[in-house]
Amino acid sequence: MKKNNAIRILVASCRKHRKFLLYGIIGSCCAGLDFAIYTLLCIMGTSYLLANAIGIHCGIFCSFVLNRRYNFRVSDKPVVRFFFFYAIGLTGLALSSAILFLLVEVCHGNAIFAKLVAIFVVAVIQFFLNKFITFKQR
């Protein structure tokens, strides 16, 4: 009987936090794309800050399409919503670049590890900004 209650609680929790969980799944896929592009470009000798900008832009476009269609399920005002999403993405790019610069240049850390830290920090902040600004139900 306790097992059934635990399963019910887990299912209820997943339903309650569905958008956050799905945002995390989509975000993980898009962050993986960003990270793969970033890593490949860094290995090829591209500046880590330029590689960061290119990877993040790829992640922004992928994330917008997937979140709009499958997570937040909104189809109205796509240009306006993309503008806000992109602006938030650019805010993430600035924050990510600052984190990378701090960890790589100031702390003399590894650029790949620094990117992982930046992705995590930026993803959490962007979830809340996108939830309450970009995909807010009107």
Image: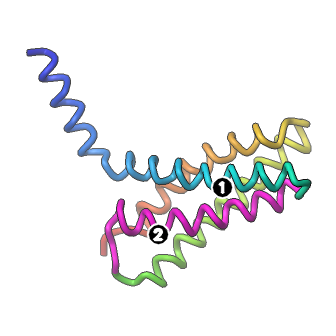
Does residue 13 lie above or below 7 as drawn? below
Q: Which residue is mark 2?
A: 65
In this picture, which residue range is highlighted in magenta? 47-75
The residue nearer to you, when weighing 113 against 88, is 113
Residue 78 falls in image quadrant:
bottom left
Q: Is residue 49 magenta?
A: yes
Q: Which residue appears at 91% of the width and 54% of the height?
A: 45
Q: Which residue appears at 35% of the width and 52% of the height?
A: 19
- In this picture, residue 32 sits left or right of residue 50: left
- In this picture, residue 38 sits left or right of residue 82: right
Q: Which residue appears at 47% of the width and 62% of the height?
A: 130
- In this picture, residue 45 sits left or right of residue 27: right
**How was this image coloured?**
rainbow
Kind of residue at badge 1: Asp
Q: Which residue is mark 1?
A: 34
- Where residue 75 appears, as percent x and y from the top left, is 34, 78
Kind of residue at badge 2: Val
Give the secondary structure at mark 1: helix
- Where residue 96 appears, as percent x and y from the top left, is 71, 53
Crowd around label 2: few <14 · some 14–19 · many ≥20 (10 Å): few
Q: CA distance from mark 1 to mark 2?
A: 15 Å
